[in-house]
Image (cartoon, helix red, strand yellow):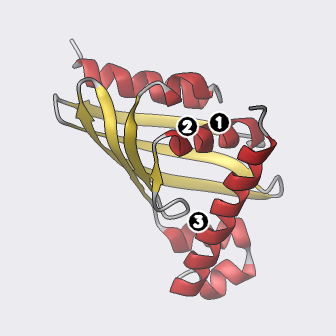
Amino acid sequence: MPHANAELLTRFYEGFAKLDAAPMRAVYAPDAHFSDPAFPNLRGADIGAMWTMLSQTAKEFRLEFRDVQADDRFGSVHWEAWYRFGGKRPVHNVIDAKFTFENGLVTRHIDTFDFWRWSRQALGVPGLLFGWAPFLKKAVNTRAAAGLAQWKAKQPK
């Protein structure tokens, strides 16, 4: 029988595969921390807002996940997503996720992926030429944060 935290992660990714952000938001503790190469430092409600934004704006999205492992404290999942970045460029992103749990909720979630590989697909020639460069990663971080802030500002209060 799978550990309760493995079941929690499975519900998260099943919701993600359906672009249903509600089960995704439900796994996080109120003071959780999320990090990935695009959103390096999200906390609390901003994590749920990011997943909701991505779920509502995804184009031609497909997700597969496997290797769900978890115990009382730590967990991991391998997942892959196919989508159109900005509604235009096809992307296949390969991600490894690591989790920390407390009281049956995620307190830390870190997604890692090859940023240069992603940027070549998502950004085209600029990603190919500069996807390895810190300035491009910083520009993507800035754009992602601005996009999330703009999306949040448009949401009903």
Q: Position of residue 32 (x, y in %)?
A: 38, 42
Q: Residues within 10 Å of mark 1 (few under 14, many from 20)?
A: many
Question: Which numbered tag is attached to residue 52?
Answer: 1
The secondary structure type at the circle numbered 1 is helix
Question: Which numbered tag is attached to residue 48?
Answer: 2
Q: Answer with mark 1 or mark 3, whichever residue precedes in sequence.
A: 1
Q: Which three-letter amino acid code belongs to the residue tagged 3? A: Trp
Q: Which three-letter amino acid code belongs to the residue tagged 1? A: Thr
Q: CA distance from mark 3 to mark 2?
A: 23 Å
Question: Which numbered tag is attached to residue 42?
Answer: none
Q: Position of residue 125 (x, y in %)?
A: 73, 81
The secondary structure type at the circle numbered 2 is helix
Question: Which numbered tag is attached to residue 118?
Answer: 3
Q: Which three-letter amino acid code belongs to the residue tagged 2? A: Gly
Residue at figure coordinates x 61%, y 86% from the top left: 130
Asked if the residue under mark 2 is in contact with the one under mark 1, i.e. CB atoms within 8 Å, the reply is: yes
Q: CA distance from mark 1 to mark 2?
A: 6 Å
